[in-house]
Image (spheres, rainbow, N blue to C red):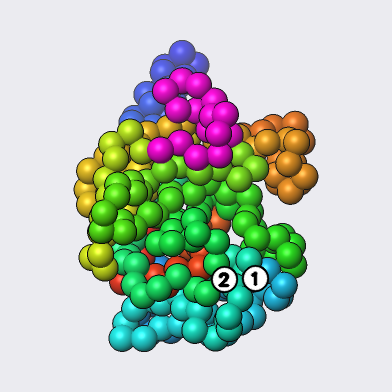
Amino acid sequence: MAFTMCLLLFTSCNTKKKNNNKDQTYTVTEKTSPKWVSLFNGTDLTGWTIKIPGHPLGENFGNTLRVEDSILKIRYDAYGPEFNNRFGTVYYDKHFTDYRLKVTYRFVGETAPGAPSWGYRDSGIQFHGQPPATQKMDQAFPVCLEYNFHGGNGKEDRPLGAACTNGMFIEHKGAQNTTTCIPADVPKTFHGDQWVTAEIDVNNGEIVHYVNGEEILRYANPTYNPENETAKSLMNGDDTKVKGGYISLQSNSHPIDFKTIEIMEY
């Protein structure tokens, strides 16, 4: 009798367990594909903060950064006869890690009076940059990587797309850089005031530069230079690996327009 009762209890529990499993429902969550998001609203400077040497963070000296005709513009008409090395940084107020960034820009007008000769049609996208609040009062350029913009002068080749480093190292073709800038493997020069689309793909330490949809440079493994005081302050202990940072635009003494600034985070 006891054996029969145990058998019945085992059968009942086992049946209940099977029924419970049968009644369970599972929800499958589909992974959404990354989408392009605009960082510039075409109306005002929401989300953007400027830093100009000699001026506190957020002070838009000389109305350097402005929005007109749905274009984000950088201008120097209020700087007077001397540029005085006021190289600005225009930050977007968010930390990014892995993403694809797309920027459509054009050079216009003349270089600011008193600017260095290299400032002619020179600008760029800075990324993996230090937090805006950590940039010192007289610090001209943040610790960052840069996709360098060059505009043609109508005569000579002035390729864009070089990878420039400030307080960091990168690996190009398996070797660490020994110069500040590494030129694009595929040289492209754009003359005049034409719109150009530059893209940066950042994914798990691999970085690729594109122009108008064509790959022009590939490199990897950005690390902080511990001999750079500011860069060392950004490190996590002895770990030199760069794990992301802030995106910014350069205010390098030549007027420039930005029509679209979009990001797709991975």
Compared across the picture, whether 85 is left or right of 37 comes to: right
Number of marks: 2
Residue 242 drawn above or below residue 101: above
The residue closer to the viewer here, 154 or 223, is 154
Residue 188 drawn above or below residue 113: above
Q: Residues within 10 Å of mark 2 (few under 14, many from 20)?
A: some
Q: Name which residue lies at 46% across and 31% down.
A: 220
Q: What are the residue bounds of the magenta stretch?
A: 169-183
The residue wearing badge 1 is 84
* Residue 72 seen in the figure: yes
The residue closer to the viewer here, 123 or 211, is 123
Q: Name which residue lies at 43% across and 49% down.
A: 147
The residue closer to the viewer here, 139 or 1, is 139
Q: Residues within 10 Å of mark 1 (few under 14, many from 20)?
A: few
What's the residue type where badge 2 is placed? Gly
The residue wearing badge 2 is 114
Which is nearer the N-term, disc 2 or disc 1?
1
The span from disc 2 to disc 1 (Cα, nearest Å) is 7 Å
Q: Is residue 175 magenta?
A: yes
Q: Secondary structure at mark 1?
A: loop
Q: Position of residue 108 (x, y in %)?
A: 34, 72
Mark 2 touching mark 1, by CB under 8 A?
Answer: yes
